[in-house]
Image: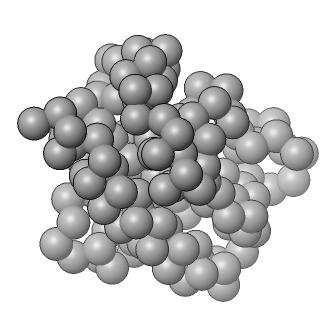
Amino acid sequence: MDEWDIAHSRLRSISAAEIKTFWDRYIAIRQGAVIERGSLYSRWRYVSHDLVISLYLTNRSVGLFVRGGRGEGYNTTKNRLSAYEPELGTALDAGLNDAPGCCYLGRLTLPVTDHASWPRGHYWLEEREEFYHRVLTEIVVRAER
């Protein structure tokens, strides 16, 4: 199944209003963490000025991956983070090159069009976001200081 399935599904897609509500509820749970809008489908949590955890949703999953700051290309980010391999990939239990265009992709299969699944998605995202933030801070940010 295509991970980026929002526009490709013949089934009902989650609406823009539902996406906004999903993210509004997530941000309310994440009191104290600064979560910014990346796009309609994503929210960003900065680890440093040029290192971002991108949280996303599709019709069938929620997930996260690591990217550079706005405007930084995937290859630039991948090349920079490769200096921390294999330690970073092992710590995150995700691969730098496992998904085209996404460094260290993690995902949870979830029927996002079913609102009853949202608490599970929120909980998973919160746990993984905090974990990624801690690991990236310990391995990448401290090394770059």
Please say whether residue 75 is visible from this viewpoint.
yes
Q: Is residue 121 above or below residue 59?
A: below
Q: Is residue 71 above or below residue 8?
A: above
In the rendering, at what x and y percent does residue 102 appear? Answer: 57, 33
In the rendering, at what x and y percent does residue 70 appear? Answer: 30, 25
Residue 62, quarter of picture: bottom right
Please say whether residue 113 is visible from this viewpoint.
no
Horizontally, residue 10 falls left or right of residue 72, namely right
Q: Residue furthest front?
A: 86
- Give me the residue at 47% from left, 66% from top: 128
Horizontally, residue 128 falls left or right of residue 94, namely left
- Give me the residue at 38% from left, 47% from top: 53
Q: Quadrant of the N terminus?
A: top right
Q: Total number of numbered labels?
A: 0
In the rendering, at what x and y percent does residue 10 appear? Answer: 89, 45
Q: Is residue 9 above or below residue 123?
A: above
In the rendering, at what x and y percent does residue 3 appear? Answer: 74, 43
Q: Is residue 118 above or below residue 59?
A: below
Of residue 30 and residue 92, the one placed in the foreground of this image is 92
Of residue 48 and residue 13, the one placed in the foreground of this image is 48
